[in-house]
Amino acid sequence: MHSDDAREMLAGSLGGASATVIEYPMDTIKVRLQDDGKRYGSVMNCIRTIAREEGVINGFFRGLPAPVIGAACENAILFLSYRAAVEEFQKAVYDKCYPSDQEPYLAVGVAGAVGGIVVSQVLTPAELIKCKMQIQNTLPVEERIYKNSLGCASATYRRRGVRGLFRGHTAMMIREGVGCGFYFLAFQSVIRRFLPEGRSFHEAPPWVHFLGGGCAGVAFWTSTYPVDVVKTKQQTMKADYLKLNFRQACVRLYKTEGMRGLFRGYSVTAIRAFPGNAVLIAVYEQVNALWEMTHGGHRHQHA
């Protein structure tokens, strides 16, 4: 493995895992609202209900191991795939690779979409397990059959095979492809405003990394949120969505819940997306900076 590849994977995995721990309680609230918004009503009522009925740890952090591992793998693959795609796209279209602060936005957007589609192949099973664990406490006692994330994965595979683990795959590919395209475009457009010409992204002040990462996270979720709601409906095995494909699920959600249903839980998602992705990018850039200090030499621009 090339040292640049190892650096991308290490920085991406540490950044992704750190962000997930910070985001997870709000992500649990998002999934609960998407799964059964009528029960909880508002974000604050959802928080109070979970804390009162399930406790803080068991309620807000249930199923955390799977998404932490998934996020580490996801972001390692995402940043590695993005870097490879943006370089190959520039070679094919422009016959050269531009400096880090001058890469064409078309190349950035396309490479982000490619990276998102690639990572969705790994992320779909992890996301499915996460969603199932997050809603388990809302089910009748006799239906709470999963003790942990591994047990959930094993039971799902035994009952429904590989296909069961990849339920919601189409929605996930669309979410990640579109979302990651906007993610990298937003990050680059923000950080370039504050980066002196010829400087690497990791040389920007930490507050710029935070701002760029936060804006990128909000851009991701704003561009794809209705798709994520449909994905949650499919992955939590809601009876009305059990036999529907992605298009049919979209139509049903809109007919039964309208525009409000398509954006249920968006506010809490946008709020948690900013700090979570700010930390992700900050950790990612710091790991890259430390790698360059310890290994020396020139490295390509990353995010």
Image (spheres, grey):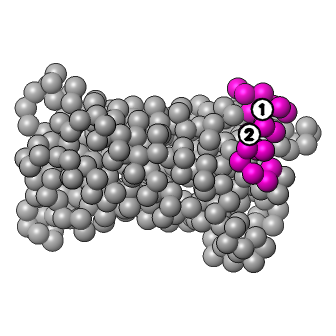
Q: Is residue 77 left or right of residue 106?
A: right
Tell me the SS state at disc 2. helix
Q: Which residue is mark 1?
A: 51
Residue 111 in view, yes or no: no
On the rendered image, what quadrant is the N terminus found in? top left
Against 99, residue 252 (above or below) is below
Please state which amino acid type lies under the numbered disc 1. Ala
Q: Is residue 55 left or right of residue 279?
A: right
Amino acid carrying label 2: it is Ile
Residue 180 coordinates in the image, percent (x, y): 40, 57
**Main SS, magenta residues:** helix
Q: Residues within 10 Å of mark 2 (few under 14, many from 20)?
A: some
Q: Position of residue 155 (x, y in %)?
A: 74, 42
Residue at left offset 63%, top offset 76%: 247
In the image, is residue 83 part of the stretch drawn in magenta?
no
Picture mark count: 2
In front of the other: 217 or 63? 217
Picture layout, residue 195 above or below residue 171: above
Stretch of the chain drawn in magenta = 40-59
Give the distance between the C-alpha atoms of the residues marked 1 and 2, in whole angstroms: 6 Å
Residue 55 counted in the magenta span: yes
Describe the element under mark 1 as helix, strand or loop: helix
Residue at the far top: name it: 294
Observer-nearest of 255 and 144: 255
Instruction: Tell me, yes or no, whether the two marked residues, 1 and 2, touch with CB atoms within 8 Å.
Output: yes
Residue at image mark 2: 47
Residue at 76%, 66% in the rendered image: 241
* Corner quadrant of residue 178: bottom left
Q: Is 235 on the left or on the right of 219, as rendered?
A: right
